[in-house]
Amino acid sequence: MDLILGAAIFDLNGLPREYLITNEVKNMSWVQTIFQALGLRSLLMSSLRLEGFHYVTIYSQDHCALVVKQKTQYTALLINQTQSTPVSKAFIEWAQNFQPEQLKLNPLFHVT
């Protein structure tokens, strides 16, 4: 959890509900990228009749965003990416079970 800089919660339609970020996050453009990725997912799934979306990772120069589908929502985690190594399978599984409400209890995070 030390690598997480922010979280964005989206409903199952891909609409944003809540953002939790640290003071290190100065730019919220990553949320727009996630919103677009969820829209693309919806388009591809309906056009190509694809099923089984579980996660997606989006890499930038300094950060990585991991979007996981959970039972009642999509959760996007902004991760401090100091190395160019991909997100591990174990971390993806952890994120799929992660409850973003935990970040509300952490004094480093605030709701935006």
Image (cartoon, helix red, strand yellow):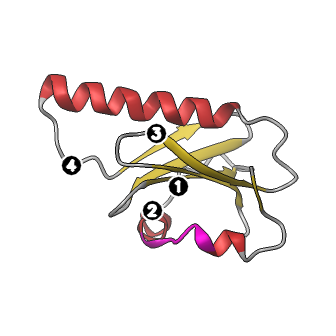
The amino acid pointed to by label 3 is Leu
Circle 3: is it few (<14), some (14-19), or many (20+) Cα within 10 Å? some
| Pointers 4 and 1 in contact (C-beta within 8 Å) | no
Does the image show residue 1? no
Of badges 4 and 3, nearer the viewer stands 3
**Residue drawn at point x = 45 percent, y = 69 percent:** 90
Q: Which residue is mark 3?
A: 15
Q: Which residue is mark 1?
A: 87
The amino acid pointed to by label 4 is Gly
From mark 1 to mark 2, how far is it between C-alphas?
Answer: 7 Å
Q: Earlier in the sequence, mark 2 or mark 4?
A: 4
Q: Main SS type for the magenta part?
A: loop
Circle 1: is it few (<14), some (14-19), or many (20+) Cα within 10 Å? some
Q: Earlier in the sequence, mark 4 or mark 3?
A: 3
Query: Can you give x and y, in whole percent of width and height, for residue 15 in the image?
Result: 46, 39
Query: Can you give x and y, in whole percent of width and height, for residue 11 in the image?
Result: 42, 49
Most extreme residue toward the front is 17
Q: Which residue is mark 4?
A: 52
Query: Can you give x and y, in whole percent of width and height, for residue 12 in the image?
Result: 35, 48
Most extreme residue toward the left is 49
From mark 1 to mark 3, how far is it between C-alphas?
Answer: 25 Å
Instruction: Give me the disc on residue 92.
Output: 2
| Pointers 1 and 2 in contact (C-beta within 8 Å) | yes
The residue closer to the viewer here, 107 or 67, is 107
Instruction: Determine whether the residue tagged by mark 1 lies in a helix, strand or loop.
Output: loop
Left or right? Give the position of 92 relative to 76: left
Of badges 1 and 2, nearer the viewer stands 2
From mark 4 to mark 3, how far is it between C-alphas?
Answer: 19 Å
Q: Earlier in the sequence, mark 1 or mark 3?
A: 3
The residue closer to the viewer here, 18 or 22, is 18
| Pointers 4 and 3 in contact (C-beta within 8 Å) | no
